[in-house]
Structures are given as structure tokens and as C-alpha cells.
Image (cartoon, grey):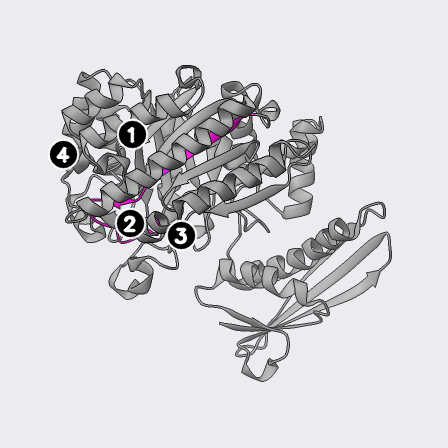
Amino acid sequence: MHIYVKGIEDERLVRPLSLIADLFFEESVLSTDKAEQADLIIAIEKQSSSSAKITLAAVLEAKTGGKVYEASYETELNEQLDEKALFKQIKNAYLYVFLKVLEEYTGIVQKWGLLTGVRPTKLWHQYRKQGVEPAEAKKRLKEQYSISEEKLDLLEQIVNHQLEAIPDLYDLRKEISIYIGIPYCPTKCAYCTFPAYAINGRQGNVESFLGGLHHEMREMGQWLKDKNVKITTIYFGGGTPTSISAQEMDMLYEELYQSFPDVENVREITVEAGRPDTITEEKIEVMKKWNIDRISINPQSYTQETLKAIGRHHTVEETIDKYLLAKECGMDNINMDLIIGLPGEGVPEFKHSLDETEKLMPESLTVHTLSFKRASEMTRNRTRYKVAGRDEVEKMMQEAQSWTESHGYHPYYLYRQKNILGNLENVGYAKKGMDSLYNILIMEEQQTILGLGCGAASKFVHPTTGKITHFANPKDPKSYNDGYEHYTRKKIDILEETLFSQ
């Protein structure tokens, strides 16, 4: 779909308008200078504008039918804002009329309104920290972003649960959390873009990687000890951290305790044991030995044909068996993941996955909506993977919401992605007291997350301004092995600048 937008004088508006167009059309191209090639023409006219107010009107004409669709929007401008914040207000006005006229044309209502970012809960947290009452926060978010009541209620629930789980959430900027990336999996799933390399035949590579990771842990741990910086949570992700051997896991966790300060008092340590085919009784015993208090065992689906289609080489029975094994070994905080919209699945298949989940009742359940990530095998070969339409995907999400509520789970974190089916969201649900603290911290960006290992992204949050500095280790093991000393030193330099710049 080629859309020509007339009346755009500021080029900074083109990218955000394109993101809104992508919500409605699978393949859209937006231009401000090629009317003759356009399938749709949208004229946005500034009816009035002053330092205090802007009024916009949008008119869309479908080239094929001649029918006209219209929308208008008026907003008060805050004259006391700086130039950047004022532009954001003006930008939102343009996005609003653009969104509304496309809703009129397509009949599709975007429940998240103008929002195309990953972390909508941050908006609610901003109001919460300012002391804004919930009713007023809802009113402002609805007026500014056209978010539906349904999604506003969800945001409010999540923020309330987050503050129950971490009452001092807004006071943790002098502490940090740690993410440790293990870039190996038995196989790579078709939808995946995480650092995930098939572990078979790579043992020498694994040993080199772990050597570099141990170095990172020792150096970073010494810096944290020297500066007396506390650790809030630790998260082992990947890849699949349980792809390495039990002996390698044992040595890694021993390094963790030796390198980092006061690990015994870290609030939560999570290990993604997501692939059931990597879990053994020996590995579970190693995690128990080192007081790992939270793991994930991820079915994604309880339909065997689906697992085969997405490249997961374990069976449904294996998922159940490994979950029961972990329970028998004393693991009492297990998360499981399901994905809405996997190839070939509709409401019946997803309800079947929920029925199977009911037999296990994990402490938390994360419900993802399939996203066509740019570098995934599924996106590169999209015609091979038939997925459900928007309406059916939304019904599956409603099934997840109803099921979790009726079984005593509450929503505690949420994030969104580009190209996510139905323009929906990913939601983590948990039993009371079983919320993942790391998931809350990584999503709400209230403290520095220090990333170690392959593909690990660090986010350094300045303790007073909240400004975020990003730095990422390379995704492939060879590049990491060649430069882990450099990446370690670089992170220490950024920590010095952010946590101790005053």
C-alpha cells in the first residue's frame, strides 16, 4: 500500500507516520512527494495554529472509489515546554488525525492508539511518580494517545502489581541488575532472532566463550565490590542457558558467587531453561545447589505439529515430564511461555494449550503474541508460515486474559514489538508473590541492567536524570571471544560515567 501524505512540512514526522501506517497495512510505503504512485492520498491541513493551540484536519480519498474520509483534532500546546517536548505534542496531533482517518477507512480500531513503542507501562509510571490520580492518568492518556479503556485498565492493573512486587521500584537506581547471555540452543526456532547457535559440534567454541564470560564476571564483579554497588536481580538468558553441560553450569554459578558481591542476598536469580530437551535431573540439582530460585520451561504450544513447524525438536510429553521432574526436585517457581498465533494455530489449538497448562499450573505464565522479526527464518520465508488473522488472534488474547483471571493469575508486566500480530502485546501473568522482579525492572527501565556474555545488551540508567545509555556485546561467539576484554573495559567506563558522574 503506497500512501501519499500531503501537508507534511517537517521531515521528522515521516517516520512516525510510517509506523502508524504499518499498523493497518502489511506492506506500506509512505511518501510526501509521489502522489502519482499512491494507492491512497491523505491531506493533512493545519486549520489553525498558534503558540497555544493547534487544529488539524485530515482528508483521505481512496483513488479507486472516490469516497472521502475525514478526521480532525485540536489540542492545547504547553508554551512552557522546551523545543523537543513541544515538537512531541505537535507530532502527536499529526499522528492522531492520521490514525483516525485510517481507522475510518479500514474499519480497524487500534486499541493501543498512537503507541508503537515497546513499553507503554512507562507512561503510567511517569504519572504515578508525579502523583497524578489514576482517573486523571487515564483521561490524559486517552486524550493524548487514543488508547482504549480496555488497554488503560490493563496498564493500571500491571503498574499496581509491579509496585506491590517491588515497593521501592522508584528508588533502585543506585543498584543494578545483571543479564548473562548464553548463546547456544539445541536448534534455532523459526521465529527467533536472539543469539542462538546450535550447540552440537561446537564444544571448543563453547569452552572459549565460557572463558571470556568468566573473565567478564570477575572484572565486573570486582568493580561492583570496589564501588559497593548492590545487585537486585540476576537473569541467565540466551539462547538457552541450560544447553551447556551440568559441569559447565556448576562452574559458572560458582564463578557467580565468587565474583559478585553478596549474591546470597540478591532478590531473585532466574535461569531460562526454556527448551525442555536441555533439562536433566543433574542440571536441576546444580541449580538447586546454587539457590537458583526461578526457572522457565517453555512449551510455546501443546500441539506437536506446531512444534515441528517452528523447529523445536522436543515433544509435548517431554515438556510435561521435565516440568514434573523440576517440581519433584524442589523447584517451586517455574514460568512457562505460550505463543499466540503460531503457524497453523487458531483458537481451538490455543485453548488446548491453556487446557494442558491447567494440568500443571506453573507459578507464572507468559503469553506472547507472535511477532514477525526482521531477521527470523519465519519472516524470510513468510509465505511458508500461515498464521491466524487479526480477529482470531484477538480472540486468542481474550482467551488468555479470561483463563488467567479465572485461575488466580494477575498481569504484572507487558511489552510490545514491531510487526506483532493484531497490534497486540506480550503479557506476563503470575500467581500472587511470584512476579518476576527482573522482568519488571528490564521493562520499566528504573535501574541499570548490566549485560554480560554473547548478545547481552546493557542499559545504563543515570541515577538522577534517568538518561539511558545503550551498549551491546556482539551476538556471535567468535566476535565475543576475540574482544571480551575490550567490551568489559568499555562497560566499566560507562558505569563510571553514569553511576559515579556526580
Is residue 192 a member of the stretch shown in magenta?
yes
Task: Write down the residue under mark 2.
Answer: 342
> Between residues 315 and 173, which one lies in front from this camera angle?
173
Task: Write down the residue under mark 4.
Answer: 318
Q: Residues within 10 Å of mark 1 (few under 14, many from 20)?
A: some
The residue segment tinted magenta is 175-194
Going 77% across and 65% down the picture, which residue do you hit? 46
Task: Write down the residue under mark 1.
Answer: 252
Q: Residues within 10 Å of mark 3 (few under 14, many from 20)?
A: many
Residue 292 vertical position relative to residue 462 in the rendered view, above or below: above
Work out which residue is located at the far bottom of the displayed protein and give it. 36
Task: Write down the residue under mark 3.
Answer: 421
Residue 468 vertical position relative to residue 328 in the rendered view, above or below: below
Name the quadrant containing residue 159.
top right
Can the viewer see residue 370 in this picture? no
**Which one is closest to the eye, mark 4 or mark 2?**
4
Is residue 402 rendered to the left or right of residue 85? left
> Between residues 16 and 37, which one lies in front from this camera angle?
16
